[in-house]
Amino acid sequence: MHIRSIEPRDRDFFLSRNAAFYRSSACDHAIPPQNAERTFELLLHGTPYADCLIAEDDDGAPCAYLLLALTWSNEAGGLCVWLDELMVDETVRGTGIGRKMIAAAHEKYNSAARYRLEVTESNVRAAALYRMLGFEELAYRQMIMDTPVGL
């Protein structure tokens, strides 16, 4: 297995797996397909706010992605790396790819003050992995307010 940054050739893989991610137990709701397309284009053209790692199997075929959101955290006192989306192909789940993807993010952003993620109650296997890697549950809930693009 090899982990690398996202490339133009990953478009179909990213978009199809992103759609699968939002249909899975990892999420409570779907997103418009154009959001993933905008994200992919942003990642290719460079941004200080996001990054994406791709895992390839031994044959060089992509089999997982990890979308990262990069923010400053006053609470943590530095860079906060959000593990925003971790999608591992069903056929290779349970082989350690998720753990290796998180380790690759930690290696790439080794000066980060905090790593953070969200996990749904129904995503039991992922939550177990995250706990095993040292993630702790927070005692408060998150809230969101979506606004139209351009406001």
Image: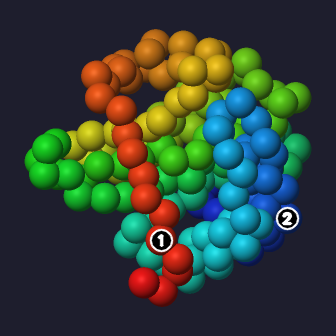
- Give the x, y percent position of residue 100: 57, 32
Left or right, 54 with reference to 23: left
Q: Is residue 73 above or below residue 38?
A: above
Give the residue displayed 65% in from the left and 39% down from the top.
Answer: 27
Residue 31 - label: none
User: Residue 39 occupies which quadrant of the picture?
Assistant: bottom right
User: Residue 128 occupies which quadrant of the picture?
Assistant: top right
Residue at the spot of label 1: 147
Q: Nearer the viewer, residue 109 or 71?
A: 71
Give the residue displayed 69% in from the left and 58% down from the top.
Answer: 31
Looking at the image, is mark 1 or mark 2 nearer the viewer?
Answer: 1
Secondary structure found at label 2: helix
Q: CA distance from mark 1 to mark 2?
A: 28 Å
Q: What amino acid is at disc 2?
A: Asp
- Give the x, y percent position of residue 10: 77, 64
Residue at the spot of label 2: 12
Secondary structure found at label 1: loop
Q: What amino acid is at disc 1?
A: Thr
Q: Is residue 107 above or below residue 119?
A: below
How was this image coloured?
rainbow
Give the residue displayed 21% in from the left and 43% down from the top.
Answer: 113
- Give the x, y percent position of residue 51: 50, 61
- Residue 3 appearing in the image: no
Q: Nearer the viewer, residue 30 or 133?
A: 30
Q: Which numbered disc, 1 or 2, marks the residue that appears first in the sequence?
A: 2
Left or right, 52 with reference to 75: right
- Give the x, y percent position of residue 106: 40, 40
Residue positioned most to the bottom: 150
